[in-house]
C-alpha cells in the first residue's frame, strides 16, 4: 500500500514538474521533424503521435514535418528502380520524383493525419505545393546535377498561419515546385528548418536514430547534452560530427541565427522523448543554442 502510494506521488510529481514548462511553451510554435529509420515501428509511431497530441492539448502549436526516405526506397525497389544518394540526398529522376510524391503525400502524410485524428486532434496534411508554400530551385551537390532535388528559395506561410489560427495541426510532406511548376523532392530536415525559421518557432526538434550528438561514436556516455552553435563547425571539421548529422546541426545553427530559440536532436527510438525534453528539467538528447559554454556534457 505504502509502496503504491509512493508510486502515485511520483506520478503526481512528474505532472507538477511539467507545470512551468507547460506555462512557458503555451501558445508557442514547435516544429517537429519526424523521419528516419524508426518511422515504421508501430509502438514508436504511436508514442510520437501521443506526444504531439499532448503538446496540442496543453496549448503548444506543433507543426509536423515528416520524412519517409525508407518507404520511398522500398517502393522504388518494388518498381525495380535503383536508389542512389549523394551527400545524403536522393538522386531524383522524373520517375523517382513521382514515386516520392506518391509515397510522401499519398501514404505517409495521410497516415500521420489519421493517427492524429484517431487521438481527436484536428490535423491537416499538406505538401509544400499547397497554397504555394514551398518554392524551390534545383539543388546541386558539389556542382553536380542530382535531378529533381529542391533547394528552398521561399516559404509562403499564409496557409500555415490560417491552419494555426483555426487550431489545426499542420502535417507537411517535403515536396515543392519551382518557378516552372516542376515538382521537386526536398530533404525533410531542410523543410523543417525553413518552416521553423519562417515562423520563428520556439523550438525545432529533430527526431533521429541516435541519442543525440556524441563526442565519440563508440562511447554512449559521451553524448553532448548542450552544444553551443559556435562549436558546431569545429566538431564537423574534426570529424566528430559526420554523415546525416551534418545537415541537422548546420540547419540548427542557421535556425538559431534566424530567431529559433533552441534546436533539439532527440532519439526518436525512445518512447516519449519529446515529452521528456519539453516537460522535464533534465531533458534528453542534445540541445543546441547560441550561448552554451564549450561542450557542456550534462
Ligand atoms: N557525432 C555524432 N553523433 C551522433 N550521430 C552521428 C554523429 N556523427 C554522425 N552521426 C550519424 O548521423 C546519423 C543521423 O543522421 P541520419 O541517418 O541522416 O538521420 P535521419 O534518417 O533520422 O534523418 C546517426 O545515425 C549517426 O550515424
Ligand atoms: C532529396 C531527398 O533526399 N529527399 C528525401 C525526402 C524524404 C526524407 O527526407 O526522409 P527521411 O527524413 O526519412 O530521411 C528522400 O527522397 O529520401
Image (cartoon, rainbow, N blue to C red):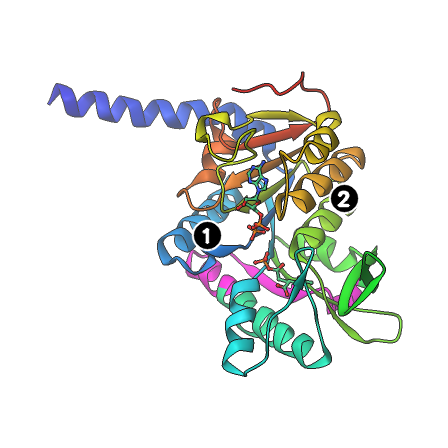
Determine whether, in the image, residue 12 is placed left or right of residue 5: right
Camera sees residue 168: no
Camera-nearest residue between 206 and 217: 217
- Quarter occupied by residue 204: top right
Residue 10 left/right relative to 145 = left
Which is nearer the N-term, disc 2 or disc 1? Answer: 1
| Residue ranking furthest to the right | 179
* Callout 2–callout 1 Cβ contact below 8 Å: no
Residue depicted at x 56% and y 59% = 123
- Label 2 beta carbon less than 8 Å to ligand 2: no
The picture places residue 110, in percent across and down from the top left corner, at: 53, 69
Nearer to the camera, 126 or 123: 126
Residue 143 sits above or below residue 219 on the image: below
Q: Quadrant of the N terminus?
A: top left
Q: Is residue 237 left or right of residue 225?
A: right
Image quarter for ligand 1 = top right
Percent coordinates x, y for residue 247 in the rendering? 69, 46
Q: Position of residue 41 (x, y in %)?
A: 39, 57
x%, y% of residue 149?
75, 66
**Label of residue 14 in the image:** none
Q: Does residue 168 sit above or below 265 in this rendering?
A: below
Secondary structure beneath disc 1?
Answer: helix
- Magenta part of the chain: 112-134
- Quickly name the residue at label 2: 197
Residue 258 visible within the image: yes
Depth order, front residue of 23/43: 43
Label 2 sits on a secondary structure element that is helix
Q: Residues within 10 Å of mark 2 (few under 14, many from 20)?
A: many
Where does label 1 land, which residue? 49
Q: CA distance from mark 2 to mark 1?
A: 23 Å
| Residue depicted at 61% across the width and 52% down the height | 167
Amino acid at each position: 500500500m505504502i509502496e503504491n502510494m509512493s508510486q502515485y506521488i511520483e506520478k503526481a510529481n512528474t505532472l507538477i514538474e511539467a507545470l512551468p514548462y507547460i506555462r512557458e511553451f503555451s501558445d508557442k510554435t514547435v516544429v517537429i521533424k519526424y523521419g528516419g529509420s524508426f518511422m515504421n515501428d508501430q509502438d514508436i509511431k504511436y508514442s510520437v503521435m501521443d506526444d504531439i497530441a499532448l503538446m496540442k492539448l496543453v496549448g503548444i502549436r506543433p507543426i509536423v514535418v515528416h520524412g519517409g526516405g525508407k518507404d520511398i526506397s522500398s517502393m522504388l525497389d518494388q518498381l525495380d528502380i535503383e536508389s542512389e544518394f549523394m551527400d545524403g540526398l536522393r538522386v531524383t529522376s522524373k520517375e523517382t520524383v513521382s514515386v516520392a510524391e506518391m509515397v510522401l503525400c499519398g501514404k505517409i502524410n495521410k497516415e500521420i493525419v489519421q493517427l492524429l485524428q484517431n487521438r481527436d486532434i484536428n490535423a491537416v496534411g499538406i505538401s509544400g505545393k499547397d497554397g504555394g508554400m514551398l518554392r524551390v530551385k534545383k539543388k546541386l551537390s558539389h556542382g553536380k546535377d542530382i535531378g529533381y532535388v529542391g533547394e528552398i528559395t521561399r516559404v509562403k506561410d499564409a496557409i500555415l498561419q490560417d491552419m494555426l489560427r483555426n487550431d489545426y495541426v499542420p502535417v507537411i510532406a517535403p515536396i515543392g515546385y519551382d518557378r516552372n511548376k516542376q515538382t521537386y523532392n526536398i530533404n525533410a530536415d531542410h523543410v523543417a528548418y525553413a518552416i521553423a525559421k519562417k515562423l520563428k518557432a520556439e523550438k525545432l526538434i529533430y527526431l533521429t536514430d541516435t541519442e543525440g550528438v556524441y563526442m565519440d561514436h563508440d562511447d554512449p556516455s559521451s553524448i553532448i547534452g548542450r552544444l553551443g552553435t559556435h562549436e558546431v563547425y569545429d566538431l564537423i571539421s574534426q570529424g566528430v560530427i559526420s554523415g546525416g548529422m551534418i545537415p541537422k546541426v548546420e540547419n540548427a545553427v542557421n535556425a538559431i541565427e534566424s530567431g529559433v530559440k533552441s534546436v533539439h536532436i532527440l532519439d526518436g527510438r525512445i518512447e516519449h522523448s519529446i515529452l521528456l525534453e519539453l516537460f522535464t528539467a533534465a531533458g534528453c538528447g542534445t540541445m543546441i543554442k547560441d550561448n552554451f559554454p564549450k561542450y557542456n556534457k550534462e
